[in-house]
Amino acid sequence: MMPNIYRICPMEFERQLFEETMRNLESRVRDASRTQEIIQDLSVQVESEDGLISMTVGPPGRIRELRFDPRAKRLDLETLAERIMVMVNDASGILQEELSRQIQSLMPDFAADEIMADFRRMNAPPETR
């Protein structure tokens, strides 16, 4: 007499595999959606060394807020422009690092660099895509 062994027919196995794959995919889509929301809400606040300029920068490096202390009027335009460029670049670098950390913590099995590259492409001006 043969032992009673439960066997799954090939069609049943394929159906179960398909359902599990769909559950995994749905879970990843939810994770990606949550990650996208977090990315959109992230921002970095920076201030010039002398405190005359402050700004808030969000992804992918867009200035959301820019404030000048009244004393900034004393700066020549070249100095003002240079300080703003340095601040934007610094803030963008900090923001990229924070975005990568957030993505890695929420989606550890995905490559943060690839996700960030996709995000930058999606948010780039249409003429540069």
Image: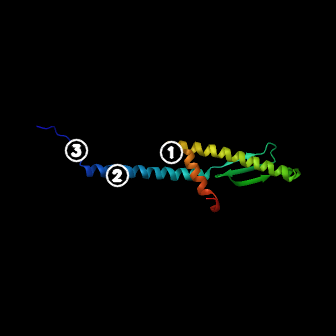
Q: Where, quadrant-wise, is the C terminus in this rendering?
A: bottom right
Determine the residue positioned at 76% across, 50% down: 85
SS at mark 1?
loop
Alpha carbons under labels 3 and 1: distance apart:
35 Å
Give the residue type that dot 2 points to. Phe
Q: Residue furthest right?
A: 74
Quadrant assignment, res 90: top right
SS at mark 3?
loop
Q: Where, quadrant-wise, is the N terminus in this rendering?
A: top left
Q: Nearer the viewer, residue 43 or 28?
A: 28
Pointer 3 or 1: first along the chain:
3
Give the residue type that dot 1 points to. Phe
Pointer 3 or 2: first along the chain:
3
Identify the mark at residue 56; answer none if there is no mark. none
Alpha carbons under labels 2 and 1: distance apart:
22 Å
x and y, in percent, of residue 108 in the image: 51, 42
| Residue that carries the numbered disc 2 in the rendered image | 18
Q: Badge 2: how crowded within 10 Å, few (<14), some, or many (20+)?
A: few
Q: Residue furthest left?
A: 1
Alpha carbons under labels 3 and 2: distance apart:
18 Å
Q: Nearer the viewer, residue 116 or 30?
A: 116
Q: Nearer the viewer, residue 24 or 89?
A: 89
| Residue that carries the numbered disc 1 in the rendered image | 110
Q: Badge 1: how crowded within 10 Å, few (<14), some, or many (20+)?
A: few
x and y, in percent, of residue 96 in the image: 63, 46
